[in-house]
Amino acid sequence: MADQVANFPPDVITKEEVRGRILVIDDEPDIRESLEALLTGENYRVELAANANEGLKRLETSAYDLILLDLMMPDKSGMQVLEEIRARDSETPVFMITAYGSVQVAVDALKRGANDYFPKPWDNEKLLIEIERMISQGRLERENVELKRALKQRYSFPNIVGKSERMLKILDLVAQVAASRATILITGETGTGKELIANAIHAHSARAGHPFVPVHSGSVPPDLLESALFGHVRGAFTGAVASRKGYFETANHGTIFFDEIGTISSETQSKLLRVIQEREFMPLGSTDNIKVDVRIVAATNADLKRMVEEGKFREDLYYRLNVINLALSPLRDRKEDIPALVDHFFTKYCRENEKFLDDGGRSRLHFDSDAMQILMDHAWPGNVRELENVVERAVVLASQPLVPVDVLPEHLLEAKGLRIRRDESGRLASDASLFEVVADFERRKIIEQLEESDWSQTAAAEALRIPLSTLNQKIKRLNIEIRKKSGA
């Protein structure tokens, strides 16, 4: 049977069928062959080391689900090997196998970090049961950690705030493409919510129970990005003291999200293209390919097509990424979403700061009409992210449920005055918004009071029963031209 296993084509058993990867470290050929035959017959992938040093060398370049370690070997004892393994790896299960069946040896092995102990000759059925239990337990623990992280990051459509026609069309597309395996490119200005949309795609796909791994390409130095993506084995480069998984292996069966994909180097572009085409990669310093099932979602605020024309981005990679394109609109083109976004962020930050919450856990804060009009009139170059920062600031500074203008950042207060749309006769536009109607009424009322007060702003403020500073802000925002007092 050992010969049959040795001659079995290694590619016949796919990665999905393999139940685990096991390293056997034993100096006796018969023991190695017997364990190889037993474990391979149960669909484990088995690697053999004929002595302690060979086993330690394999551990430097590969990762295993379990190690079967002989206690007595000519070059180094199993106890020494166990100590060296535990010095750099506290998680991989180690089963000690020995002909010396004393209780004290078993106790010593367990104290030094072994997970179990089997005397020779072992019971095949018991050994297989314990191997399966240990590998399954380790895999379950890892999957639980990954699942908790994925659930924490999970978004659903109700959490994507927006009822504008542009946003509803995007959500329709998300619903259509989420279930597919297609690679997706999300484009849009900084702050438009590209990662939020990527999360929604993942959360509504069959991969939702597996990791969503974001890669912020622009913030990772180019010389470290490749190692971060593909992982490395010990000794692959200076400082690589232990083998590490990369983002692709972590995201297996899930989704990997590349933010600002246009920033990656040409060399990394080539390797990413190969992963998309072959669904496999090679960790740095390794000679073994690792197959992965990962969905790729990429995002950029750059014009990738122009970068292709300028030779800064691979054309073949661009077309591989741009199978489905979701183009997110800037906030200035969907201002009807601003009130709902403001309410959403008010509740979010009121909960974080534990203030101004009603019995249902919703925020009691709202901007006064002047502050809200300033928000509606702003161009929002930083998009939703900029709006979120403004609302968070308001929550921190608010002292009452009605939030006044003076809590807004200076750059908003210094913005140009409000534009009230009018027709050719000077009347309000027929489709004027409520904000424009209110602003037009305020403007006429303030001008009327200023005229009655002989253009004394102090007297007008007293008559209107508002602070002088508030009146000055309104005059500036509503583009009211101040005239000289009579006799001045």
Image (cartoon, rainbow, N blue to C red):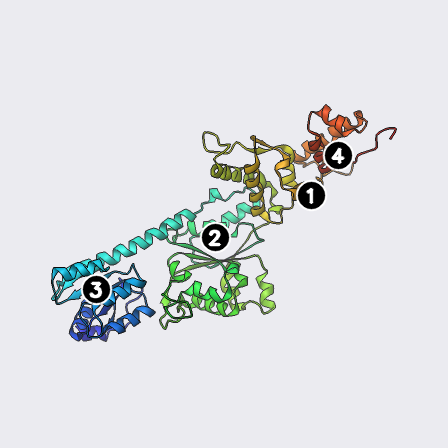
Looking at the rendered structure, the secondary structure element under dot 2 is helix
Label for residue 42?
Answer: 3
Q: Residue at 47%, 42% (x, y): give it.
A: 158
Q: Residue at 40%, 60% (x, y): give it.
A: 294
Looking at the rendered structure, the secondary structure element under dot 4 is loop
Label for residue 427?
Answer: 4
Looking at the rendered structure, the secondary structure element under dot 3 is loop
Depth check, mark 1 against mark 2: the one in front is 1
Of the image marks 3 and 4, the number of the one nearer the N terminus: 3
Depth check, mark 1 against mark 3: the one in front is 1
The answer to whether any part of residue 459 appears in the image is yes
Amino acid type at mark 2? Ala
Q: CA distance from mark 4 to mark 1?
A: 25 Å
Label for residue 415?
Answer: 1
Which quadrant would residue 360 be assigned to in this image? top left
Of the image marks 1 and 3, the number of the one nearer the N terminus: 3
Q: CA distance from mark 2 to mark 3?
A: 39 Å
